Amino acid sequence: MTDTGAPGMERIRRVAASTGLDTARLEKDMTSSETATALARNLALARSIGLDGTPTFIIGTREIIPGAVSLDELRAALSRLKMAAHP
């Protein structure tokens, strides 16, 4: 996470193109009412359960991990989820 550049449209297009994304489709999706509606629903849901930052990881229905965590911490959370499902 060493990328500190500003996320302007030209930069977004360049990064998207470098990863093989369809930049025209990306720009269309970024400005669509469907995308705005989905984001608003997700934001309302997050606020309704007390989430206010990113990243936030929701593991199953029992665990919420706010903030950046290590791969080992995510693996441990998934292991706990598996153990709870199959004791």
Image (cartoon, helix red, strand yellow):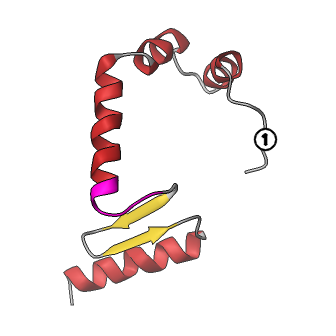
Q: Position of residue 2 (x, y in %)?
A: 79, 48
Residue 80 sits in quarter? bottom left
- Which residue is at the far top? 24
Extent of the magenta region: 47-52
Residue under numbered circle 1: 4
Q: Which of 25 and 33 is in front in this view?
A: 33
Extreme residue toward the left, this view: 86
Residue 63: x percent and y percent?
Answer: 34, 75
* x and y, in percent, of residue 75 in the image: 48, 74
Whether the magenta-drawn stretch holds residue 26 is answered as no
Q: Residue at x 42, y 77 (%)?
A: 77
Residue drawn at point x = 46 percent, y = 60 percent: 56
Q: Residue at x 39, y 74 (%)?
A: 78
Q: Is residue 87 above or below residue 17?
A: below
Residue located 27% across and 51% down the image = 45
When the figure is inspected, residue 58 is found, relative to residue 78, above or below; the finding is above
Q: Is residue 68 left or right of residue 62?
A: right
How far across and down, in percent of the image, does residue 42 sit? 31, 44
Between 25 and 54, the one nearer to me in the picture: 54
| Main secondary structure along the magenta-highlighted residues | loop
Task: Identify residue type, mark 1.
Answer: Thr
- In front here: 53 or 14? 53
- Lateral position of residue 66 relative to residue 19, left or right: left
Q: Residues within 10 Å of mark 1 (few under 14, many from 20)?
A: few
SS under mark 1: loop
Q: In which quarter of the image is the C terminus?
A: bottom left
Q: Is residue 26 above or below residue 71?
A: above
